[in-house]
Image: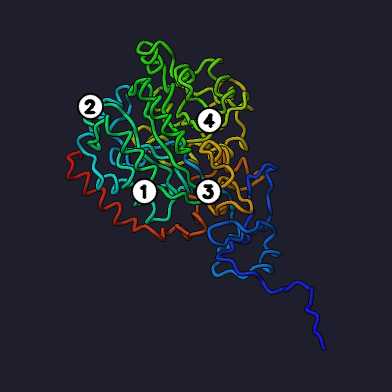
Amino acid sequence: MTTIPSRIPSRRPAPVDLLVHGGDVLTVDEAGTVVPDGAVAVRDGEIVEVGPAEELRARYAAADTLDATGCLVLPGLVNAHTHLAMTLLRGRADDVTLQGFLERVLRWESELLSADNVATAIRVAIAESVRAGVTSALDMYWFHEAAERVAREAGWRLHTGPTFMDVPDAADGIAYEDRLEWARRDLAGRTRRPGTRPVLFAHSAYTLSPEQLTGIGALAREFGALLHIHAAENATEVATVEVRHGKRPVELLDSLGLLGPDLLLAHAVDLTGAEIAALARTGTSVAHCPVSNLKLGCGIAPVPRMLSAGVTVGLGTDGAVSANTLDVLRALGLAALVHKADGDPTAVGAEQAVRMATIEGARALGLGAELGSLEAGKRADLIVLDLSGPHLAPRHDLWSTLAYAARADDVRDTLVDGRVLMRDRTLTTLDEGAALGDLAALVSRSGLV
């Protein structure tokens, strides 16, 4: 007798590594979908499905679970511009102009930085970031190899690579004429991992010549790398570049053929209407750093005009010297507030600000297809935010709750690639006490105290 196999699909639950369930899930997808009492199923670091918790609990057998009842589940925050190891110098260059800040910091960096010191400083920066719900960051700094090693050990998503800055006494001791070949070897040796891409950093048009910028841009194109550069941070920088090169920073970058979807500008505070149009025309993105820009007296970036023109704008904290914090939620809240100062309360709304801290930051990095929202097929970078605090009640609108009321210490759990880096406010992959002790010892040895 021939047995005909059943065509009734098996109801056996499919295995997954993790199920985050029970909280309201703010997906930050195009439609702004919210799933009340929702769940996120994760396998091999990837989101398998997002949907109602009851359905996903029946559909999947999870090796591990996170009960998010009473919480908000949302994409991890993306820090689109920072200098993480500057935690070493936090509080050492306050209440000065951008130019005064640079004079102090460049000298200290040349005296203090080494691969070991960067590793010590970035370990604390990652701890601070994980606690604040930041799951990835674009980090421009010296000794990026040491930073990558620490981030890899912690399971945290770091976007970094070789930095170019033609200054005397470069902190890493690599002569400028050797940097292109050094960077080429670095890029050639990289293995593409999900949720990452190669990155090159050109510090600015005032520390690099047009010829140097052109060479760096060509190298970035050769390897399909993101190129990241400070540009138009304040009026003095713009005037300096104009005197040296006859063009404003964005004009210069445009004339060199460097504007485009693989270029991300940090700050972009001092822009003309024509420059905003050029950014939109070329698909160039911007990392808006409102805390740092205000603290250094740089001004307020014309974010509403950039958004109206169609420019992709993410959020950055800048370093812990210029902003004193790596808290992207703080930058998010300020971005939603500061642009209303001109009298338009709709200039940057709550939802827009949240998107800038998540999906728009991912798009600015060229990684919007992999990061920045909770959707099947994307990397499982997500956070669970505890909604039990009185400052979060009642919750008439989740976007507004995030933009105007939430704080970094509301973050309960932080996951990168589906790995829990913080559970119930306890770091699981970093020894926070040891990291803080090592930083304190380094500061003491350095004579900064």
The structure residue drawn at horizontal position 32% and vertical position 36%, both measured from the top left corner, is: 181
Front position in the image: 27 or 412: 27
Q: What crowding class fits label 2: few (fewer than 14 Cα within 10 Å), some (14-19), or many (20 or more)?
A: few
Q: Which is more N-terminal, label 3 or label 2?
A: 3
Front position in the image: 100 or 16: 16
Q: What amino acid is labelled 4 in the image?
A: Ser
The structure residue drawn at horizontal position 39% and vertical position 44%, both measured from the top left corner, is: 188
**x%, y% of residue 161?**
38, 40
Q: Secondary structure at mark 4?
A: strand
Q: What crowding class fits label 1: few (fewer than 14 Cα within 10 Å), some (14-19), or many (20 or more)?
A: many
Q: Quadrant of residue 6?
A: bottom right
Asked if labels 3 and 4 touch by Cβ distance under 8 angstroms, the answer is no
Q: Residue furthest right?
A: 1
Q: Give the CA separation, mark 2 to mark 3.
A: 38 Å
Q: What crowding class fits label 4: few (fewer than 14 Cα within 10 Å), some (14-19), or many (20 or more)?
A: many
Query: Closer to us: mark 1 or mark 3?
Result: 1
**To which residue does mark 1 refer?**
148
**To which residue does mark 2 refer?**
168
**x%, y% of residue 342?**
57, 20
Tally the numbered discs: 4
Q: What amino acid is labelled 3 in the image?
A: Gly
**To which residue does mark 4 refer?**
285
Query: Closer to us: mark 4 or mark 3?
Result: 4
Asked if labels 3 and 2 touch by Cβ distance under 8 angstroms, the answer is no
* Residue 80 visible to the viewer: yes
Q: Secondary structure at mark 1?
A: helix
**To which residue does mark 3 refer?**
76
Q: On screen, 195 above or below 40?
A: above
